[in-house]
Image (tube, helix red, strand yellow):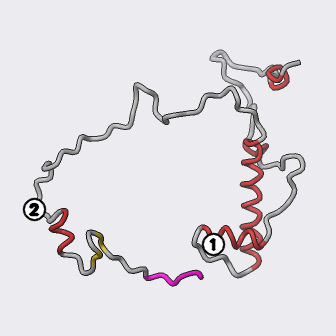
């Protein structure tokens, strides 16, 4: 029996061919994949916070809730990783070829305002380094 036959089952449909009852639930993706029972460690959680440049919570209740959320996300993605998508062509664009994101044509000089632009605006900066604005970070470092 081939894979398609294993995954296909008879489903009651209405006159438009739509299922009359739900055929799938996202909750099925929250169940652990076979052999995937390990939780994220405190060290791994701290590493994720460091990568995201965020401060980890100090109380254990919040840490455990975050670890549970990360575990659920991990289980969710594992369901996708175990599927075989070998015959699926990759999506190149999110829009169909005949439909796209309509962008306006920006032409230099279209702006009729008298606001300073370009080098004139850069000249008014309090602090700069070459052709770049300097912005000082107000947040303390996590290191």
For residue 129, side relative to residue 119 (left or right): right
Q: Residue furthest front?
A: 130
Query: Which is closer to the viewer, label 2 or label 1?
Result: 1
Q: Is 139 inside the magenta-drawn segment? A: yes
Percent of width and height locating residue 30: 77, 49
Which class describes the residues within 10 Å of circle 2: few (<14), some (14-19), or many (20+)? few
Residue found 10% across the figure and 62% down from its top: 114
- Depth check: give the residue in front, 59 or 141: 141
Image coords of residue 49 (percent x, y): 64, 71
Report the span colored magenta.
Answer: 138-143
Rendered position, 18 above or below 141: above
Residue receiving disc 2: 114
135, above or below 74, in the image: below
Residue topped by disc 1: 50
Quadrant (top left, top right, bottom left, bottom right) of the C terminus: bottom right
Q: Give the residue displayed 82% in from the left and 63% down from the top.
A: 39
- Between the C-alphas of marks 2 and 1, the distance is 44 Å
């Amino acid at each position: 029996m081939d894979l398609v036959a294993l995954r296909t089952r008879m489903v009651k449909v209405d006159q438009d061919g739509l299922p009359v009852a739900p055929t799938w639930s996202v909750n099925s993706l929250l169940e652990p994949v076979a052999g995937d029972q390990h939780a994220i460690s405190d060290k791994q959680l701290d590493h994720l916070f460091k990568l995201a440049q965020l401060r980890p919570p100090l109380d254990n209740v919040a840490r455990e809730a975050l670890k549970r959320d990360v575990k659920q996300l991990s289980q969710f993605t594992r369901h996708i990783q175990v599927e075989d998508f070998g015959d699926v062509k990759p999506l190149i664009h999110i829009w169909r070829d005949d439909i796209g994101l309509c962008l306006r044509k920006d032409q230099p000089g279209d702006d009729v305002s008298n606001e300073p632009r370009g080098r004139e605006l850069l000249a008014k900066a309090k602090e700069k380094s070459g052709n770049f604005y300097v912005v000082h970070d107000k947040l303390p470092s996590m290191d």
